[in-house]
Image (spheres, coloured by chain):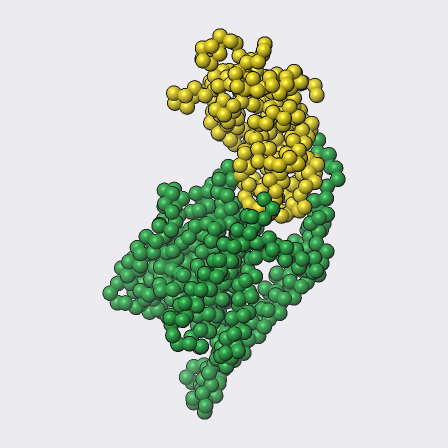
Amino acid sequence: MSTPQVTDVDIAAAGDSAGVGQAMGDYFRRIKGGDVGSLPAVLGLIVLVVIFSVLEGNTFFTALNFANLLNQGTAIIVLAMGLVFVLLLGEIDLSAGFAAGTCAAVLAVTLTKWGWAWPLALVAALITGLVIGLLIGLLVARLGIPSFVVTLAAFLGLQGVMLLIIGDGGTIPVQSDVLLAIMNKNMPVWAGWLLWLIVTAGYALVSLRAIMNRRKVGLPSTSTSVWAAKVLSIAVLLGVAVFLLNQQRQIVRPGKVACVKLGPPNEPLGCIPVIQGVPWAVLVVLVLLVVLTFVLGRTAFGRHIYAVGGNSEAARRAGISVSGIKIACFMICSFLAAIAGVLLASRDNSVSPTTGGAQTLLYAVGAAVIGGTSLFGGRGRVMDAIIGGLVVAVIANGLPLITQQSGIQYVVTGLVLLVAASVDALSRKRSSGSLR
Amino acid sequence: MMIGTQPLLELKGVNKSFGPVHVLRGVDLSVYAGQVTALVGDNGAGKSTLIKGIAGIHSFDSGEYLFEGKPVSISEPKQANALGIEVVYQDLALCDNLDVVHNMFLGREESKGIVLDEITMERRATETLASLSVRTLKSIRQQVSSLSGGQRQTVAIARAVLWNSKLVILDEPTAALGVAQTEQVLNLVRRLADSGLGVVLISHNMNDVLQVADNIACLYLGQLAAQIPASDVGHGQIVELITMGRSGDIGLNPEVLAAGGHA
C-alpha cells in the first residue's frame, strides 16, 4: 500500500470483550454457530461420573478407582493426542494401535532379550514409531493412496511384524525399574502439590503475559476478570484431582496396617505398603499436552496443519508444502503411538501380541472425536484427546461395575462414539450453512 | 487519473501454446499504476492463460514481459510475488477454519523465533483493512466460515494488498455476489487503484467493467482485439468486441478475422 489512510474503522472496537458476562455471551454465540468444541464431552463426562457415582458410588467414586481410571486412560489419551494431528488433516490412522504394540515389542526385545540399557531401548522404540509414520506418510502424501487404505494395510502388516518381533515366546517381560515406574509408581505427596503449583502458576503467567502484550499495543484482549475466572477454575479442578490422588488408596484388609517404609527389614508383619500420590504417567501426559499444544497453536507449522486440514488447495497456493505437513503429521501420530506403546508395556509389565490390539485404537479415535476433534479435518486440539480419553476411560472403568455383560459395554461405547461423530457432523453442517 | 508515462506491466507479443492448441497469439497488454484495467473476453478467449502467465503459474512461450520497464522472466508464482504481483483467484483460496488474520498471513506468517507473532500480524492486518476502508468485518479474529461472500472477497483482496503489492489481479471478484456486496467489492477495487496500485479486473459483467475500469482490454480467440480507454466505448461496443473481435473502427483487422483469427 502506498497511501495507508486510516478512516473510521470499528474492527478493533467490536472485538473488545468487556468481562465474564460478555465472554459467556461470545461463547454461547460460538456454540450456536456450530463450534461446540469440547462442551458435549465435558457435559458427558459430568453426567457419566454422576450416574456411576449414584449407582456404584462405593466402588466408583473412590481415590483408588480414580487413580485406576487415570492408569487405564493414559495410553488411550497419548494415542488419541497423536490421532488429533492426523484427524486435523482430515485423514485417519487405523494402524496407531498396532504401531504402539510394535514399538512396545521393539522395546521389550531390545531390553530383555538383547540386554540393552533402558534409554537405548526407549530410543529404539521411539525411532521405530517415527519410521512407521514416515512410511505411512510417504505412501499417503507422495503416492496419494487414501490414508484409510494405507493404514488398514499397516494395521494388518504391523500385527504380523509384532508377532515376528516377539517370536514364539508369546509374552516378553519388561525389566527396567525406570520404565515400569512410569505407570506403576506415584510422585511423593509434596511433588504432586509442586506440580499443581507449577501448572497453575505457569498457565496464569503465560496467559497474563499474552493479555498484557496485547494491551500494550492497544489490541483487543481478554478482560482480567475472564482471565481470573479461568485461572481459578483450573486451580480448583487440578487441586481437587491432586488432593484425591494424594489420599492413601491402598486396600487395607482387616487385621493389617498400612506402612510407609518399604523393604523387608523394617516392614512390620502383615504390613500393606501405602499407595498415594499423583501417578508419574500424569506428568508424561501433561508434558505432552504442553509441548503439542504449543506446536499446534503457537508455531507456523501448527498453523499450516490447520490450513491443510481446512483447505489443502488454499494451503498449497499459499506456498505451504502440503505433502511435507502430511508426512510430519503421520510421523507425529506414530511417534506418540510409540510413547503409548511404552506406557502400555510399563502398565502390563510385559509385551504380548495383544498389546495395542483389541479396542485400543477405536477407543483412541473415539477419545479424539468425543473430545471435539472433527473427523472432517481442520478442527481439534490436543486437549480434546484428554477430555475424550477421560470419557472413554470412565465408561470402560464404570460400566463393568454396573454390569458384567461385555456385550452391553461394547454397545454403550459404540453408541457414545456414534453420538460424538453425530455432534461433529451436525456442527459442521451448521457452521457451513450459517451466514453464507 | 493521469496515465503514467511508463506502464507498470507491459506484455509485448506474448504467445502460449498447450500442445497443438495455440491459446495466446501475440498479445500486447499494458497495465498502469493507479488504474483499473479490465480484461474481458468470451470463455476460451485466453483470459485465464494470460493471467496465469503473468502470475508465473506457467511461463509464456515467447514475447516480452516488462515489469516497471525492466524485462523480467517469471516461471513460478514466488517470482511474481517477489515483484509485487498478487492474484486473487475466483475460488479465493481461503481456509474456512482459520480466522481473518491467519488467512491473510497464510504461508507467510510473522514469527519471533519459532513462535508466531500474533500481535504484529493482527496489527498489520488491521492497518491494511483500515487503509482499504473496510468496515464490514465485525471482528478480525472471526473465522472465515462465518463471513459472507463479499466479506470473503474483501479478505482475499486485503491479503493480496498486504504484501506491498504493486499489481493485483482479480479473477471475477463479483461473480458469486449479490447487488449490495458487488457494490462493496467494486468500491474496494476502485480504492485499490486510487491508492496507486495497478489493478487487472477480469469480469463477464459489462456493468461492473464500465463502472470501475479505466481502460478495457478485450481478448478474442487468443488475440488482443483492442485495449481502449473505458470512456471511449459503450456497453454494446464491448459486447461486439468480445463476440466478433471488431466493433466499428476498433478491433482486429478484418482480414485477420476473415482468416478465422489466424494471423
Q: Is residue A308 above or below residue B91?
A: below
Which percent across, then down, holds residue A139? 36, 46
Which percent across, then down, holds residue A244? 55, 75
Q: Residue furthest left?
A: A168
Q: Is residue A64 above or below residue B199?
A: below
Which percent across, then down, holds residue B141? 63, 47
Residue A295 in sight here: no
Q: What hue does chain B carry in this figure?
A: yellow
Residue B15 in sight here: yes
Which percent across, then down, holds residue B209? 62, 25
Q: What hue does chain A carry in this figure?
A: green
Q: Residue furthest front?
A: B236
User: Could you tell me which quadrant the C terminus of chain A lies in?
Assistant: top right
* Along the line of sight, the residue nearer the viewer: A38 or A296: A38
* Along the line of sight, the residue nearer the viewer: B50 or B204: B204
In-image side of B50 versus A20 (left or right):
left
* Along the line of sight, the residue nearer the viewer: A76 or A388: A388
Residue at left offset 48%, top offset 50%: A377
Q: Is residue A152 above or below residue B213?
A: below
